[in-house]
Amino acid sequence: MSHIIDFAGRIYRFAGPVLWLNSAALLVIGILQSVGILLILPLLGITGLVDFDASGIPYVGWLFELFEGVPRTQSLTAILIAYVVISVCQSLFNRHQTILNKKIQQAFIRKLREETYKGLLKADWDFFIRHRKSDIVKLMTTEIAQVKNGLSSYFQFMSSLIFAAVKIVLAFLLSPWLTAAILTAGLLLLASSRYFTRKSEQFGQENLKLSKMYIAGITDHMNGIKDIKSNTLEQTHADWMSDVCGQAEHNAVAFTKLKTNSQFLYNIASAVLLAGSVYLLVNLFQSQPAQLLLVVLLFSRLWPVIVRIQSKLENLSSMIPSFEALVELQKDCEQSRELRNASFRDIRPAELKNGIELHGVWFRYNRQKEAYALKNVRARIPAKGMTAIVGPSGAGKTTLADVLMGLNRPERGEVRIDGQTLTEENLLSFRRSVSYVPQEPFLFNASIRENLLIMEMEATDDQLWEALELASVAEVVRRQPFGLDTQIGDKGIRLSGGEKQRLVLARAMLREPSILILDEATSALDTETERRVQETLERLRGQVTVIVIAHRLSTIRYADQVIVVDHGAIVQSGRYEELAGDPHGVLGRLLGHQQELAAQIGSA
């Protein structure tokens, strides 16, 4: 229950006075409903369908006195007109309240989505290393939809509470002892229903766990569908799907059983209480037919409201795990926030004039463990030159690049840009001057033009073609059926690996960066295209600071400086010719291995 109260508190803090206005509208609707019920008594008396004396009914006899001495036709007309007016007013208030509920619901969900997404964008790189992408997508889609449904249940819960309060007050005025007895029984049932609400929350937690597993599995399988089909792994994954769906089916059926069990209990209690109430009214309280009819009518309207309160409590309880997961994600984003007092608007790029320096940089991904990914790294990357970072797989090359971009913050030591320490104050300006081309190119399921304009929204067609020419991919685009407006499919699936890589390179060049970082960006290129990209990099020499992380050592032959990384430390640094000529050095051994491999492939 405490989680539901916390959820209600967040809604109130968001909606404020509007929520009170909504509650006032609900109160008016409840009063109008009750007045409509009261009008049934004089209507029955006037029509003669029931012959009774209502003078003994508290707070109701005056209704009959109003129509004493009034001709039957006029009385009937007045009552029916009053009923129509009350129904119209009730419908108007109900319409207003429904629209107001929807406005609050949509505004709350929009705020929840925007706050969570902005929090994700402002989180540091370590946050995304620690969290599975599919879990984040799941929370931003399915779980927010669950919270939206829960918000609907909350408004229905609150309306049921207010309607019940109005009807209880009216019932107390008519028959306080009987109402007290019925209310006591209802409160006892609600108290006993804590078992159902706790079980509903457990089902919600299990459903959250299963849905995360499902989304993550589907995402992984679709990303690796080529491997699945080429290695005939279809049956394994079909079995996985069957198992997950079976668990989800069992959970859904069990939750339905829980809800029907609680409804069954309440229906039985309703029948017993109604029968007992009628017995007490007739035999013990000697009630008049009018009073008996009115109490029975009120009870028949009140008890379903109590049942609905219980049902909405169960729905809210099953939603709470989704809401808690979103709140936890927001807290995690805030704790991992990269920049505290920075705006992403109107960022002016910095211009690298002298170079980048790393002074005694230590970094590790998990501070609970002793292993460091980078150890006492000291290096200088001069401006307007080409620096290559090489080393065996897992040596720390990409980690070093992430530190250079400010994605990874050093645990010790510092990164200096033109002599100034890289801090929150200059991080965005520096990063705005960087274009990064990853090892695995990422393209959106959109046109070539849209994929390029993501980097520079105001770029002209001439600028787009210039960037495509620089990346040696212009001819590929010209061969497409719709040129720049050709749709390239999910992750650029309609292009080859090399074409995708060059298109991402063109996108990077469109920004006209001060620093260009290529993270093994030529690994998917054929020899001829690689040569042309190398020519492009040569043309950029003296204009752009180029940092190349390379596995294929042929791509770094013309670098101004080569930095060799091994086990997180810089073990060699200098000109390519100097380092390659040392057969005992790491670079010399790497070159020897690659030459041996090339010779074996050539002889085969």
Image: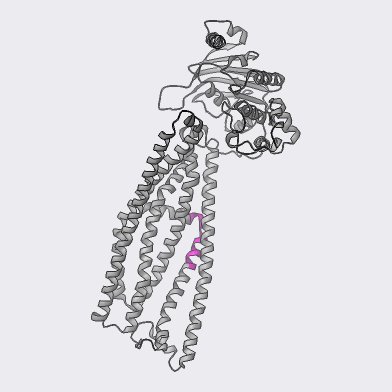
Name the residue rendered at 40%, 85% in the picture.
44
Q: Quadrant of the C terminus?
A: top right
Residue 17 in sight here: no
Image position of 576 (left or right of 27): right
The answer to which of 264 and 333 lies nearer the viewer is: 264
Mark yes or no: residue 289 visible: yes
Q: How is the image coloured?
A: one colour
The verdict on residue 21 being magenta is yes
> What percent of the width, then of the height, locates residue 194?
31, 56
**Residue 139 magenta-highlighted:** no
Q: Quadrant of residue 487?
A: top right
Quadrant of res 269: bottom left
Outermost residue on the left side: it is 284
Closest to the observer, 4 or 221 = 221
Most extreme residue toward the right, as rendered?
A: 462
Q: Please report the bounds of the magenta region as a residue range.
A: 12-25
359 on left or right of 347: left
Please tell me which residue lies in front, 599 or 370: 599
Number of marks present in the image shown: 0
Q: Is residue 287 above or below residue 116?
A: below
Residue 132 is situated, as x and y percent measured from the top left of the image, at 46, 36
Q: Is residue 462 above or below residue 65?
A: above
What percent of the width, then of the height, locates residue 547? Answer: 62, 21
Quadrant location of the N terminus in the rendered image: bottom left
Residue 116 percent coordinates (x, y): 51, 44
- Classified by dominant secondary structure, the portion drawn in magenta counts as helix
Residue occupying the point 38% across, 82% down: 59
